[in-house]
Image: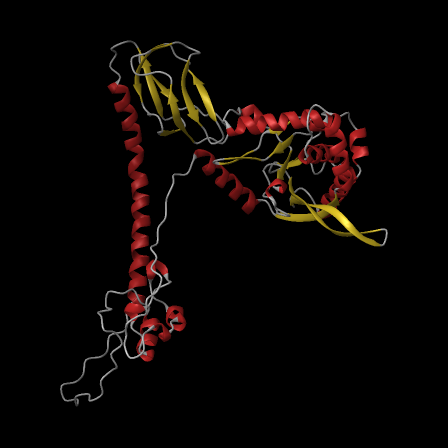
Amino acid sequence: MAEIVRMPKMSDTMTEGVVSKWHKKVGDKIKSGELVAEIETDKATMEYESYHDGILLYRGVEEGGAAPVDGVLAIVGEAGEDYKELLAEETAKKTSAAPEEKKEEKKEEKKEEKKEEKKVEAAKPAEAPKAEASAPEATSVAPETSSSDDSRLKVSPLARKLAEQKGIDLGRVMGSGENGRIVKRDIDWFKPSTFAAGSMQMSPTFQAEESFEEVPVSQMRKTIAKRLAESKFTAPHFYLTIEIDMDRAIDARESINAISPVKISYNDFVVKATALALRHHPKINSAWMGDKIRINKHVHIGIAVSVEEGLLVPVVRFADGKTLSQIGVEVKEFAKRAKDKKLQPADWEGNTFTISNLGMFGIDEFTAIINTPDACILAIGGIQQKPVVKNGQVVPGNIMKVTLSCDHRVVDGVAGAQFLQTFRTFMENPVILLGQNSI
């Protein structure tokens, strides 16, 4: 009997999936557990294995197409079996739900139409009253302001009046308002000197054409937009910034890399120092759960990784118990798999704290949006050479700025400041940091 294969929910935030590649064509035999298609979710491209046995009778989404979660992905059944009735039933379900949606859409359309009508009426200049038949004919003539017909131009009433008073040809004015509408500021900024003396001809100017490109929003970008908006507008953020003296960390890294087969980055120091500081300040390693606060006793650090469509946050688990080398290898592997879209849900779930590092891109300092439900995120800037005061003397120094974004529902200013002090102690004294664990 023919069965509908529905678009699976392959991550907790997935609302629709895009079929990036089919491994089976209509008429092919499918066995349970066999690879059928590759589906792009909001975070990665994942392999979909069949849970059905039979013949692929129908593909509901072609390569590059999208379907909502639980939408028709395919139909599997016996060879030659009629599946059109199944599709008809599915279409009928959608149709029955459509009228209410259309009613709402029409209501919104009517509201928008009324708004536009009001705008148009407000923009129309008031009509002059008709003269009485017995009134004497006016002898004064209004100055001509345009050699061309400007009745079709989009002009605010005030801008039109000012242009008439100043003798400005509206056909020569470029509008900066909505849809190119000429507004008061365009008249105020207009310079008559741009016209040739004794005529209304504009002197030669640079000619340019407006252009743009629109690209579809990827599943990943949709989810990033939704989650970050929810975080920014629901979690009350506050920010704490400190400077860290990186002189000793620079020396320690050079010494380690001179003998270690695995090269250590400054980011590896940051992850390790953060993990150990979280162990001392569990309130920072917390999550807002609505009606309760979860204080995590394990340390799973999410590392923001840039990919073409946006950001992914793979997780270094139990980071406080790992060496610098282990952290370095793991982060590099995550970055590679993220760019190849090979990360799996288990790789990006379960973080208790997040780090975002833009130092390698020359950014001195920035604030990051909290990766909910985490209570905090640490933004890492680059190492800058600048004069510093040591022992009463101004000397060259290497300074790194870091900013902790905190959810004020969970973390107070003092708790955040204490965490940063501990983090700075580890970064400025790498001997203590390395003493916690081997390289």
Q: Quadrant of the C terminus?
A: top right
Splitting the image into 4 quarters, where does residue 322 fall? Answer: top right
Residue 342 seen in this snapshot: yes
Residue 147 place in picture, x, y as percent: 23, 73
**Where does the image place residue 116, in percent across and percent down from the top left?**
31, 58
In-front residue for pair 423/5: 423
Can you tell which quarter of the image residue 185 is in?
Answer: bottom left
Residue found 39% across the figure and 9% down from its top? 31
Q: Is residue 279 visible?
A: no
What coloring was used for the rendering?
secondary structure
The relative height of residue 244 versus residue 62 in the rendered view (above or below) is below
Q: Which residue corresponds to the image point at 24% horizontal and 65% vertical from the top-left? A: 152
Q: Is residue 397 left or right of residue 175?
A: right
**Image vertical order of residue 104 relative to residue 124, above or below:** above
- In the rendered picture of this protein, how many numbered marks are placed on residues? 0
Residue drawn at point x = 25 percent, y = 19 percent: 85
Which quadrant: the N terminus? top left
Residue displayed at 67% across by 27% down: 327
154 to the left or right of 398: left
Answer left or right for 31 relative to 409: left
Q: x, y (%) of residue 112? A: 32, 53
Taking the view exactly as shown, the residue that stands out farthest to the left is: 133
Residue 46, how many percent across, how many down?
47, 23
**Residue 177 lies in what quarter of the image?**
bottom left
